[in-house]
Image (cartoon, coloured by chain):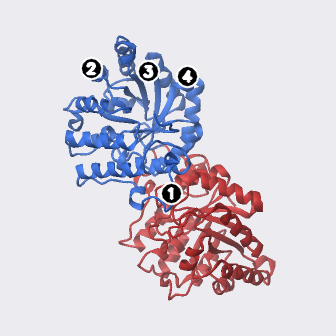
Chain colours: A red, B blue
Amino acid sequence: MKSIDIEISEVGPRDGLQSIAPIMPTAAKKAWISALAAAGIPEIEVGSFVPASVLPQLADTAELVTHARQIDGLAVAVLVPNLRGALDALTVGAHKLTIPLSVSETHSLKNLRRTHEQVLADVAAIRTAIDALPRQQRPRLEGSLSTAFGCTLEGAVPERKVYEMAQKLVAAGCDEVGLSDTTGFASPAQVRNYSRGIWALLGRERLNGIHLHNTRGQGLANVMAALEAGLTTIDASMGGIGGCPFAPGASGNIVTEDLVFLLESQGLRTGINFELLFAARRVLAAALPGVELYGFTPQAGLPKDFVAATAQ
Amino acid sequence: MKSIDIEISEVGPRDGLQSIAPIMPTAAKKAWISALAAAGIPEIEVGSFVPASVLPQLADTAELVTHARQIDGLAVAVLVPNLRGALDALTVGAHKLTIPLSVSETHSLKNLRRTHEQVLADVAAIRTAIDALPRQQRPRLEGSLSTAFGCTLEGAVPERKVYEMAQKLVAAGCDEVGLSDTTGFASPAQVRNYSRGIWALLGRERLNGIHLHNTRGQGLANVMAALEAGLTTIDASMGGIGGCPFAPGASGNIVTEDLVFLLESQGLRTGINFELLFAARRVLAAALPGVELYGFTPQAGLPKDFVAATAQ
């Protein structure tokens, strides 16, 4: 096992592919996931257990979990919108289940068509289902605090509401919570304050990760605040594809390639190899002709004489 | 005079316009500079005193200095490549003169066609010319440490070379030095370390500002490091136009609009009004049809319920 400082969780196969019209063939998805893992990405969110009628782009999630589980050392994550999705995820044996809860209840109703109470009841039921498994087969369960930093529908989301929902998710059975800037509203001050607030309330082990968007170009600046606060897992999407399709005006995950450069250039090891990462991008580009990929580092190339922290 | 926390120095009229082919009409430049100042930008680099044969886009710099000096409270900055340019700047009465010195001597020869020794000799001569003026008419003289973070031609630039050049610039007569990531190589660790290194060597008042590029998408992340270190003046270009035309592969200043959002969203006052800033962008866009303007915040708009620190 390589020693890494910051864990990048690649959400492109889920958050990216659900946001674009073309449906990527399953074989191409498998090749992309394998290429990402070969580059050293430690965790990949390979899909979401939603009905194919809602997101036909992700209809092959079960098959992708099975594929990804065969890759040595890779943590296989999936999104589960509800109990039914979670049961599907448990059947195929994902390592991590993420259930989103929109702190803004308006967004929750619109995005998941559920109230907070309904989501929390599902968390409790998922917990029960997980605990019925033998200990070694139990996946981690994360509650993702969507719209934590503000909502395109409700506007400002009160900080106390974020803490209240974090506490309720853990009380209902989540192993941990994650902060999610669904709408691209986050400021560095919020990232720092909310992380510290949740740690003070629930303990350090209950929050490790953050999901940031680049809607207003602030993605990597907010990563700096996350690093300063002490978060250790950061979501990103190769080529910056995706974002939240249900939040009007919001678009753009942070770009994996630029994030890896940010971390490696300041001495933080990600365990990722740039050459193989750029190769994975070419696999993605070839499978999605006509879809625009973002990211400055792949275009500019690495600086002359650059040596990544992971390579040292 | 409004109280501000971080001073944004708008370099678009110089660094931006010198990098694009179309020549912006003088009247349009004046309107743009006035619009920028009306939005609350405290300092504008309005041009460069280079021969019109080299950069015809900036041939009207003297007229722009005269125009900008009539704007109450605005600091009028210009780039001067040498003594001759500096004397022109003194004649029209710019408030601040910036002379670049490429820490990479290869880049210095290619960009300015001068050795370090020649640049330092000019700094000394400029100092003498400034000191010959009555005290109230003396502009500030800044030495800009170009390619401080690495060079597309030489590769890695030794840290000790940055400090050596900073010391020599001050010894030769600069009031202060500035750090410049001409090539888009900078990492947050470098930004922090080099700032502290120069302060330890020359005193806090000798370094205030930094010029960052977004070549690998790291611009605002590096701003976060600059803020953490304690730098107080940050260069940016409206619409992200410009960069260094002589550094192959390098492109893209950080975007003023996204920088202002980054600062204001975390409670740092810039003195800038967003509505008027976006109006200034429309003035620029109208004057440069066909030139692509960058920046996410103007496209996404401000978050619902957003209140800028300056407006509080």
Camera-near label (4 vs 1) is 1
| Label 4: few (<14), some (14–19) or many (≥20) C-alpha neighbours in 10 Å | some
CA separation in Å, label 4 and label 1: 40 Å
The answer to whether the residues at label 4 and label 1 have Cβ atoms under 8 Å apart is no
Q: Are marks 2 and 1 on the same chain?
A: yes
Q: Which mark is residue B202?
A: 4
| Amino acid type at mark 4 | Leu
| Amino acid type at mark 2 | Thr
Question: Looking at the picture, how far across and down is residue A127, in whole percent?
Answer: 75, 79
Residue under numbered circle 3? B174
Q: Depth check: B61 or B134 in front?
A: B134
CA separation in Å, label 2 and label 3: 19 Å
Sequence order check, earlier mark of 3 and 1: 3
Q: Depth check: B159 or A249 in front?
A: A249
Sequence order check, earlier mark of 4 and 2: 2
Residue under numbered circle 1? B306
| Amino acid type at mark 3 | Cys
Residue under numbered circle 2? B91
Q: Which mark is residue B203?
A: none
Label 1 resides on the chain identified as B
Q: Residue at x 51, y 36 (%)?
A: B232
| Label 2: few (<14), some (14–19) or many (≥20) C-alpha neighbours in 10 Å | few
Sequence order check, earlier mark of 2 and 3: 2
CA separation in Å, label 2 and label 1: 44 Å
| Secondary structure state at the residue bearing disc 4 | helix
The answer to whether the residues at label 4 and label 3 have Cβ atoms under 8 Å apart is no
